[in-house]
Image (cartoon, grey):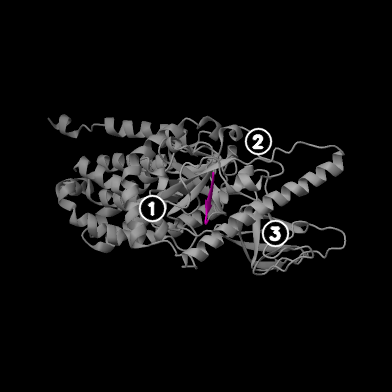
């Protein structure tokens, strides 16, 4: 009897130890062998999304996203139109410049594909995963709604928010990595004169639009505090033009071949600070064009013909394509039910 | 302990974790309180040893599965299974060790134990990522920044521990904790 009361059942301890050892192995498994875990993540998303959606709605009701500065709907519409037109203008201008460069360099006509077909989809933001180091948004739209890897999210029509990574598209929900997450790394941006409050019209500048013959490139990285900063790279000038000095208020646009071409020339943010380092190089701080928490984003989803192609080197597109997306899944201007209302 | 009540509470806390953190975030820093860890600390304060360890492991596993991590410069994401599960087990074990000398019904007790639990859990998570980063360069990882940000989240968790602790204490009868089991486990130590 004394033996029986003194014996300890060690089975639970053994099973716990065994499970912990398996978890240690899984935790240290290299990324190239961990692709299969995404499926389990998708299942977890599927299970957890039903409770997140009502909670996100309650939270957004209790703490609404920051209201836009312009309340007048007509002015807001005009501003949005202007932003879209500028977005298209810079893409076309880049196309023209690239075309000129190619013609000059190669002395032969090259077929510039130029078409930029993408559709737009409004997706509600139902969750934000953050543990202090990683920032991921969870969108209420997935493969069922047409979301694919590489889709780019924008806010206020043209402000780049981030992109949907590989493995981030579930059946009904998808993940979005914002450009302010440190894992995104460096982003190449271009600043044109004449754009933004701090800009001055260049020699050939047009009213409200910056001249595209003059630009300054910068490579900025997320700081982890919601903004981006980095050194100013080379400027592009034509003979006779004065070098552009960056100033707070100027706007930066994406010009990075590592990003999809349907994201090129989107607004990355506004320059808030420029500092000259002891070595003479300028460093800029850019405040993104969006602010968390977001209630929804507009996804730019490439058409099927464009999905498998490599990112564009030129990052160009046509005005018509950009202004008239091919068969939008849901008009971006009427976000009645985020996520396309298909859940 | 009622496993159904724990499962429902865990499900709701997982939902809160991502739904409530954005508005509670300090500016755009990504620093926000944890919710699941408060539940882990609460269960570890009141239940017996093995149910606590298994529950914390499963809750940590759920966090691992819902938390994707960017790789390859943010162009892809994967789930890393293990770090949070092991971290939560370690954190729960610390609470099991400390609870014998705490006044359990005091609201500040849960807040204190939550901070201890979450700090140890995040230390384990960062250590595992650090080991991983030695041979796997796919993940962008800065141990010092990561640990600092997570520690800030842990301290911020005090606020959620007070609120969530009050709510959990109101639901105490549903969890079916028995005081005898706690005394027995504590007494054995």
Q: Assign the magenta stretch its main secondary structure.
A: strand
Q: Please name the residue that numbered disc 2 is placed on.
A: A310
Reply above or below: B155 against A166. below
**Which region is colored magenta?**
A152-156
Residue B92 position within the rendered picture, expressed as x and y whole percent measured from the top left:
33, 47
Image-quadrant location for residue B7: top left
| Secondary-structure class at tag 2 | loop
Residue B118: which numbered mark, if any? Answer: 1
Q: Please give left or right for residue B182 compared with residue A194 in the image.
A: left
Q: Quadrant of residue A204?
A: bottom right
Q: x and y percent of residue A164 in the render?
A: 52, 42
Question: In the picture, which quadrant includes the N terminus of chain B?
Answer: top left
| Relative to B42, residue B60 above or below | above
Chain letter of the residue beneath label 3 in the structure image = A
Q: Residue A191 has which mark? A: 3
Q: Residue at 65% x, 48% y: name it.
A: A319
Distance from the alpha carbon under mark 3 to that under mark 2: 25 Å
Identify the mark at residue B107; answer none if there is no mark.
none
**In 3D space, how far apart are the residues under numbered discs 2 and 1 (Cα atoms)?**
43 Å
Q: Residue at x 25, y 62 (%)?
A: B107
- Residue B102 shows up from this direction: no
Is A195 placed above or below A15 here? below
Q: Report if residue A50 lies within the magenta region.
A: no
In front: B174, or A308?
A308
In the foreground, A6 or A230: A230
Left or right of residue A282, residue B31 in this image:
left
Whether residues under marks 2 and 1 lie with C-beta atoms below 8 angstroms apart, the answer is no
């Amino acid at each position: 009897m004394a033996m029986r009361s003194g014996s300890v059942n060690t089975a639970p301890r053994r099973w716990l130890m065994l499970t912990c050892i398996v978890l240690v192995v899984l935790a240290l498994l290299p990324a190239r062998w961990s692709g299969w875990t995404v499926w389990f993540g998708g299942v977890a998303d599927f299970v957890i999304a039903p409770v997140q959606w009502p909670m996100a709605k309650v939270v957004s009701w209790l703490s609404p996203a920051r209201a836009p500065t312009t309340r007048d709907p007509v002015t807001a519409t005009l501003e949005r139109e202007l932003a879209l037109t500028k977005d298209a203008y810079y893409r076309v201008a880049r196309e023209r410049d690239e075309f000129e460069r190619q013609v000059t360099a190669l002395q032969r006509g090259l077929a510039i594909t130029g078409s930029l077909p993408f559709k737009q989809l409004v997706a509600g933001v139902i969750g934000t995963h953050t543990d202090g180091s990683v920032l991921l948004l969870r969108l209420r739209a997935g493969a069922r709604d047409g979301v694919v890897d590489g889709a780019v999210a924008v806010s206020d029509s043209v402000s780049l928010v981030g992109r949907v990574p590989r493995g981030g598209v579930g059946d009904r929900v998808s993940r979005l990595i914002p450009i302010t997450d440190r894992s995104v790394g460096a982003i190449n941006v271009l600043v044109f004169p004449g754009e933004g409050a701090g800009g001055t019209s260049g020699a050939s500048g047009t009213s409200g639009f910056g001249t595209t013959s003059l630009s300054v490139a910068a490579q900025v990285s997320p700081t982890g505090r919601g903004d981006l900063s980095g050194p100013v790279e080379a400027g592009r000038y034509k003979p006779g033009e004065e070098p552009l000095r960056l100033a707070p208020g100027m706007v930066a646009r994406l010009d990075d071949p590592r990003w999809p071409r349907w994201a090129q020339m989107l607004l990355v943010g506004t320059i808030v600070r420029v500092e000259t380092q002891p070595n003479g190089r300028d460093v800029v701080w850019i405040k993104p064009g969006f602010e968390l928490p977001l209630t929804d984003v507009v996804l730019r989803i490439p058409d099927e013909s464009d999905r498998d192609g490599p990112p564009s080197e030129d990052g160009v597109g046509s005005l018509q394509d950009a202004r008239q997306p091919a068969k939008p899944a849901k008009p971006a201007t009427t976000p009645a039910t985020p996520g396309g209302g298909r859940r | 302990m009622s496993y159904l009540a724990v499962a429902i509470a865990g499900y709701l806390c997982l939902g809160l974790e991502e739904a409530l953190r954005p508005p509670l975030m300090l500016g755009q820093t990504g620093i926000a309180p944890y919710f699941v860890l408060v539940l882990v600390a609460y269960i570890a304060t009141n239940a017996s040893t093995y149910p606590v360890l298994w529950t914390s492991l499963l809750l940590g596993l759920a966090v691992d599965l819902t938390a994707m991590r960017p790789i390859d410069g943010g162009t892809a994401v994967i789930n890393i299974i293990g770090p949070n599960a092991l971290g939560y087990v370690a954190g729960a074990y610390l609470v099991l060790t400390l609870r014998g000398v705490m006044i359990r019904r005091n609201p500040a007790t849960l807040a204190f134990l939550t901070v201890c639990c979450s700090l140890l859990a995040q230390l384990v998570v960062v250590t595992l990522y650090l080991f991983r980063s030695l041979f796997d360069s796919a993940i962008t990882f800065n141990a010092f920044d990561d640990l600092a940000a997570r520690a800030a989240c842990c301290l911020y968790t005090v606020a959620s521990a007070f609120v969530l602790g009050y709510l959990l204490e109101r639901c105490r009868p549903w969890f079916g904790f028995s005081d005898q089991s706690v005394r027995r486990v504590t007494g054995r130590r």
